[in-house]
Image (spheres, rainbow, N blue to C red):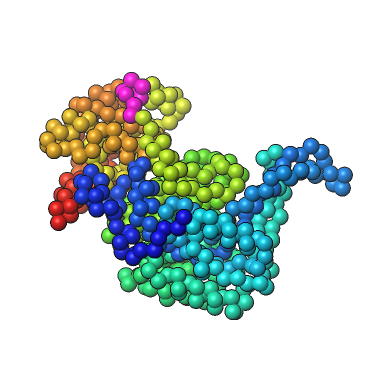
Amino acid sequence: MAAPDVPRRSRVRTDPALRAHPAVPPLASAPLAADLPARLAQAAPRVVVLGDAVLDQWLTGPSRRLSREAPVPVVEVDHTTGSPGAAANTAANLAALGARTELVSVLGDDADAATVRELLAGYGVGLDGVVTDPARPTAAKRRVLADDALVARFDTTPRAAPGAGTRAAVRDALRAAVDGADAVVVCDYDGGLLDEEVVAAVAEVVGPPGHRSCRLVVDAHDPARWASARPDLVTPNAGEAALLLGRELGGPDRVAAAEAAGPDLRERSGAAAVVVTLDRDGALLLPDPTGDERAPAHRTFARPAPESRTCGAGDTFTAALVLALAAGTPAATAVELAQAAADVVVGRPGTSVCGTGELAERVAAAEGPLLDATSLAAIVDEHRVAGRRVVFTNGCFDVVHRGHVASLNQAKRLGDVLVVALNSDDSVARLKGPERPLNPLADRAAVIGALSCVDHVTAFDADTPAELLELLRPDVYAKGGDYTPEMLRESATVASYGGRVVILDYLPDRSTTSLVDRIRGGAAS
């Protein structure tokens, strides 16, 4: 059911009861945790999706013989399913995750259009912005599966671009839909709908950077076409990034290549920030270097899946990313949530939609158990035998903020496996004072374990992790904050077994104490 229409400003605020509790940070500083999907659904930002809509359909059944006309399997179709595709799939995912969603697109006047409309209405997507063009068929992709094996695909593709009247109607629908929106996401997949006049209309209705009425996110096969609109964010995959750069993301490390290309990607796309999606290698956030966040690049780590089971995962990724950004969450949290949502649908047959409950379940499952030292030592030994490089870091991580996330992401990139050791509640109290921690160990472990860069979480009760380091003997001991190796008592332990100490980049003006003071001050006022 679609969310009721309420004023935009009240929709994107967090529940006052949550804001008043210092252990539950506002969405503007929220980490990835199992309660975040529900909080985003409660905020219900209003999102407009503009782009090419497709009907994805699967015809499945057994195959027991080959055709006499040609050596091809005869599929006895006994089941037909359909899903919204392309921009329609992004809209369906946004609505399923709690956004108040309006689709601006073009459909034909045919049975496939009726199916797409029915499917979208079932998810609660607003359809007032969908224009009917009787002169063009609705785009459709039909796949024939014999016992779950894809044997054929046949497409219905409009032969010509929409006429002038249809394009004008789309621009009018866009202007009407954007009023009061929190975000516009453009899904430009070369369907002929989004011409230069539409690009100009988008730039006009969202306004220039710095005076923008809402966020603009572009997911396009050719992001350079949208440079004049100055998107807040573009989301190219590896191939689209290569097209934008005029060169492949070469070398053995595509993530490093994408990070090095960040300035060129931003310049050529006109975007303030870029998220490069790299399928099996996860995604890389290249934030706006001039924005308030001034954060380093942030990488997510994906759940591997066969190419045949990733249909629509990019749409789900984009939808969750836009939902989180539109509600005001930090960019690193938004891209982590997007990765978790993509992981929900990867591996499912067909084009799939991720809902709030499924996403919360996925994040909760990723949190994983809090391992005891003995169990963790056995696991680390297995990693070492397999030739994996183990990185260890530690901290209180009481209220997780942007500096924590950036440090953990950087730590993971020093090796293959990241182990995070948390100070116990008693240890935190000794280090930080009797009013800390605000969050008990189990909750802190859940938040840290939900990050895709973290592989294992454990705890220690001493003031330093020296004993745990001696037991695990990680290849790298990474420490965040304003330290030098000489300041750390545990550096001698690491040196004794031949390990390496690495001091992570320090992100200034980011501390739990100052964050707690601001939250408490806001609650008091």
Q: Tell me if residue 516 can be seen.
A: yes
Q: Which residues are magenta?
A: 370-377
Q: Tell me if residue 253 can be seen.
A: no
Magenta stretch encompasses residue 44 = no
Height in image: 449 above or below 240? Answer: above
**Residue 233 on image: x %, y %:** 41, 61
Horizontal arrangement in the rendering, residue 15 relative to residue 101 (left or right)? left
Residue shown at 20% from the left, 39% from the top: 438
Residue shown at 33% from the left, 36% from the top: 446
Residue shown at 40% from the left, 43% from the top: 360
Height in image: 395 above or below 227? Answer: above
Horizontal arrangement in the rendering, residue 375 relative to residue 464 (left or right)? right
**Residue 395 on image: x %, y %:** 24, 36
Position of the C terminus by quadrant: bottom left
Horizontal arrangement in the rendering, residue 426 relative to residue 282 (left or right)? left
Horizontal arrangement in the rendering, residue 308 relative to residue 196 (left or right)? right
**Residue 5 on image: x %, y %:** 39, 63
Residue shown at 23% from the left, 32% from the top: 423
